[in-house]
């Protein structure tokens, strides 16, 4: 099984020497480094390490804050390592999951992650129930997708010209349903009657521009 080292600094002005020396002294077979802020979710070489690592390998870091940008994120990273069957050693923290005591730490991290998910689910459900009790429904608020907002003026212009059928408008603008068409027209300030058929095309055979 291999020891895979990981080091990270936030800016190009910072140096990795301290971390690299410690990782080499710890006997790492390969070392991956990133120069990226801890608040950035995408760390390319960390992702390469995970892609290369195999079950039973050990990830070695200088300190826990090299992995996570927050406590919640750190818990998620440690849980991900556990799912992959990878060990973790933090040289500056009392964490070494190759030992029985370290395995206990892993289990505690995973339990905290599960607890965080359960709390979030409970809060969401409670919020939805409170909203329903006040006559409001949860979920995505009504609105119109940005793509439809952009084409609304053109849809309104052709609709009011009365030269295209409903189906032609929907096909031309790739609108999936009449309900969405009506929403687009209302957004554009067009008066429509959804219960009646959209005005029959005056010249159905006239091609759209």
Image: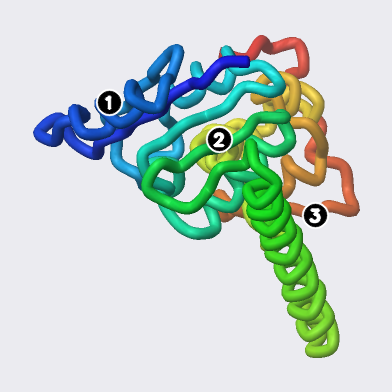
Q: Residue 63 in the image: x percent, y percent?
A: 38, 45
Quick one: label 3, few (<14), some, or many (20+) residues within 10 Å?
Answer: few
| 44 with respect to 126 (left or right) | left
| Residue under the point 80% across and 54% down | 193
In the rendered image, is residue 157 in sight? no
| 91 with respect to 17 (left or right) | right
Query: What residue sits right under mark 3 in the picture?
Result: 193
Query: What residue sits right under mark 1 in the picture?
Result: 20
| Residue under the point 51% across and 19% down | 49
Mark closer to the chain start, 3 or 1 = 1
Quick one: label 1, few (<14), some, or many (20+) residues within 10 Å?
Answer: many
Q: Secondary structure at mark 1?
A: helix
Q: Secondary structure at mark 2?
A: helix
| Residue under the point 68% across and 12% down | 206
Q: Nearer the viewer, mark 2 or mark 3?
A: 2
Residue 147's disc number: 2
């Amino acid at each position: 099984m291999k020891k895979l080292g990981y080091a990270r600094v936030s800016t190009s002005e910072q140096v990795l020497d301290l971390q690299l020396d410690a990782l080499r002294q710890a006997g790492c077979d390969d070392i991956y480094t990133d120069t990226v802020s801890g608040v950035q979710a995408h760390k390319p070489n960390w992702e390469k390490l995970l892609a290369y690592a195999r079950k039973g390998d050990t990830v070695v870091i200088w300190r826990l804050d090299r992995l996570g940008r927050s406590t919640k994120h750190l818990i998620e990273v440690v849980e991900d390592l556990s799912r992959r069957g990878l060990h973790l050693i933090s040289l500056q923290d009392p964490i070494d999951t190759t030992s029985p005591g370290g395995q206990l730490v892993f289990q505690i991290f995973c339990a905290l992650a599960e607890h965080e998910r359960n709390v979030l689910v409970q809060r969401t459900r409670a919020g939805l129930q409170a909203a329903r009790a006040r006559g409001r429904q949860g979920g995505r608020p009504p609105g119109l997708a940005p793509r439809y907002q952009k084409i609304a003026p053109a849809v309104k212009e052709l609709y009011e010209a009365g030269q295209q059928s409903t189906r032609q408008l929907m096909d031309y603008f790739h609108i999936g349903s009449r309900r969405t068409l009506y929403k687009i027209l209302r957004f554009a300030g067009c008066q429509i009657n959804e219960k009646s058929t959209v005005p029959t095309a005056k010249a159905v055979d006239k091609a759209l521009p």
